[in-house]
Image (tube, coloured by chain):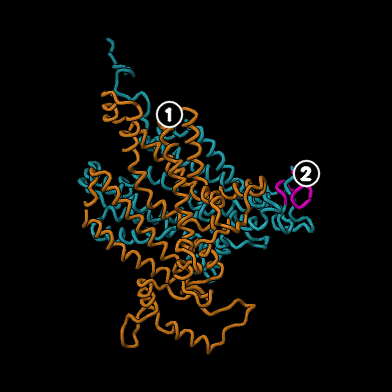
Chain colours: A orange, B cyan
Amino acid sequence: MISYIVRRLLWMIPTLFFVALITFMLMHAAPGGPWDRDLSARQVDPRTQELLNKEFGLDKPLFINTEGGNPLDSQFFNYIGGALQGNLGPSYRQRGMNVEDILFKPQEGKPIWSSKFGYSMRLGLLALGLAVLFGIPLGAIGALKRNTVIDYFSLLISTIGISVPSFVLAIFLIVLLAGRLKLIKIVQQDWSSPGAWIVPGVILGFGTFAFITRLTRSQMLEVMQQDYVRTARAKGLSEKAVVARHMLRNALIPVVTIIGPALAGLVTGSFIIEQMFSFPGSGREFVQSISRRDYSMIMGTTLLYAVLVAIANLTVDITYGFLDPRIKVGK
Amino acid sequence: MTVQTPTLDPTSTMVLSRPPRSLWRDARARFTKNKLAIIAAVVLFLFTLVAIFAPLLAPHDPLKIYDGRGYLPPAWVAKGPTGQVGDAQFIFGTDSLGRDVLSRVIYGSRVSLVVGIIPVIIILLVGVAVGMVAGYMGGKVDNFTMRFGDILYAFPDLLFFIIVMTALRDTPVGKLMNGLVLLFIALAITSWIGLARLVRGQVLSLKEKEFVEASRMVGAKHGRIMFKHILPNCLGPIIVYTAIRIPALIIAEAVLGYLGLGLRPSTKSTDIFITSWGALMLDGQSAINAQPWLLLTPAIAVAIVVLAFNFVGDGLRDALDPRLRDR
């Protein structure tokens, strides 16, 4: 088991390396340089650009330094080296700010979770919490009361939630809640009150909620037919004990294993919802860096998200191994 | 003397009383029994017709600007948020410039249709070929392609699309067909690997089967074994995978359009692809109070088409692999 975990962790290194390489190459294929201004603004003069390039090492070769000395003293490998030490380089558009400052540094005097990434993380956790809290009971009840109105309701909700993308659902809810019913403000300024978080949290978590509902239902249906459930009933256990201790416990194994990737998916996939609600998280920052062509910011955020996804995918196999000893992951 | 001619009694001979039921026949029977899937298939058929015959169906020219008639509410609204009255001429109202929303949404369906076709063809060709070869050859070829696939797989799909589109949008490739060519490439690059993995898994189990061994014994060439014996047996999962992948591509296009990274809306009436649902939603977002239907109409269109594809996909899965029912 341990050797398996180590092997999987080591395998993450080439994976992330190539993700960084692909992103780096694409960002450099993009026309325009880091010091370009909007056409309307005053351009940075060539002499300053040269100095800036020297200051940030952008005068070095892209991949391999052939001018003698250290062959790895190139833009790409310096970037990787910096990233490993938590230095993602300066933002091309936000003067004097490093990418990691934008993402992780909270405002003056605020706790760490009020950084851009902290906001996104909290929204993702809220969405995941809501999805688990409502998804598991709905799926379980649907399976226990199969082919009743409740079951059809849970099937309908989960089908819609899985197929219709969250940003389309968000559009419907925003138009309904903000446009018609005037219940929420579209542009929420104050994110300190918990009430403001509910609507974006619900919308973000809806797809995950639907997925958990469907997964719980299908797992419950399978578990219900197992011999050990019949045995539990035969020895006279109360229905409550059978459901809670014998059915749910086994049915929830796959549900628990997807929680890691689900959280990663929610944190990295929230950018459209964040943009719609003007939510001050890293996702909205990412969308804005796209429209501003802030390449270093795009690259840093992509790397961060890729790391999150890679770790989350790793947790699936590991938790599975712990929760269900019949599965031998080492092989 | 009469010669007794043996008469053939049809019931006594060993003739099949009815043609054998093939897998496909069974599947078709199961599919047609699934009412939801049939309705969804009809919806998709209509969607295709709308996309192809957009110029005939659209009530207005999608590019024509009706001066002073911007932000008209839908026809059934007596008084819109901007105080204007709905006009029966414009069923879903008009946008900021006074262009008919319904006509633009009808034209937008073309992009969604083509995004569901061209990348899928690339994915099918590459994914099936790579999966077949990797699974059949095994060894180093298999190892290399699968490791390469692992790397692509680790890249979150949507992030990859976004990066490709942002970086290459202003290059010559990114400008072909208003950005559609680049969009196809980006969508295809990440999606073939899933199919290749699926096909490889199928091939790995199929190549040990007796019928493949028998075919090898009588001296069939590798190509024949792959295409005549193994490929037809993988078709079921391939069809299901494709049906489930198409709505994901349509959603990806809508997301990219919504971020302003998809098709560049055109103003030339000679273009086939004038706007996309994603681009229309981007337009609508800024006018959410003045004309919510600008945002709602393309959103509803996306929801309907994606739901229909999902129902057809579920129906196909149940029909081709009944064991997976209720999953």
Relative to the observer, which residue lies in front, B75 or A216? Answer: A216
Q: Residue B39 in the image: x percent, y percent?
A: 54, 36
Determine the secondary structure under disc 1.
Answer: loop
The Cα–Cα distance between marks 2 and 1, rounded to whole angstroms, is 46 Å
Mark 1, Cα crowd under 10 Å, few <14 / some 14-19 / many 20+, is some
Q: Would you say B204 lies left or right of A181 here?
A: left
**In this view of the protein, can residue B55 be seen by the observer?**
no
The residue labelled by disc 2 is B78
Q: Amino acid at mark 2?
A: Ala
**Residue drawn at (58%, 59%) of the image:** A278
Q: Residue A47 in the image: x percent, y percent?
A: 53, 90
The chain letter for the residue carrying disc 1 is A
Q: Is residue A197 above or below residue B211?
A: below
Q: Amino acid at mark 1?
A: Arg
Q: Where, quadrant-wise, is the C terminus of chain B in this rendering?
A: top left
Which residue is at the far front? A109
Mark 2, Cα crowd under 10 Å, few <14 / some 14-19 / many 20+, is few
Q: Residue A116 in the image: x percent, y percent?
A: 49, 63
Q: Is residue A111 above or below residue A42?
A: above
B84 in magenta:
yes
Q: Which residues are magenta?
A: B77-93
The mark found on residue A146 in the picture is: 1
Q: Would you say B233 lies left or right of B39 here?
A: left
Q: Is residue B221 above or below residue A56?
A: above
**Residue drawn at (72%, 50%) of the image:** B93
Image quadrant of residue B315? top left
Relative to the observer, which residue lies in front, B128 or B219? Answer: B128
**Residue drawn at (59%, 83%) of the image:** A43
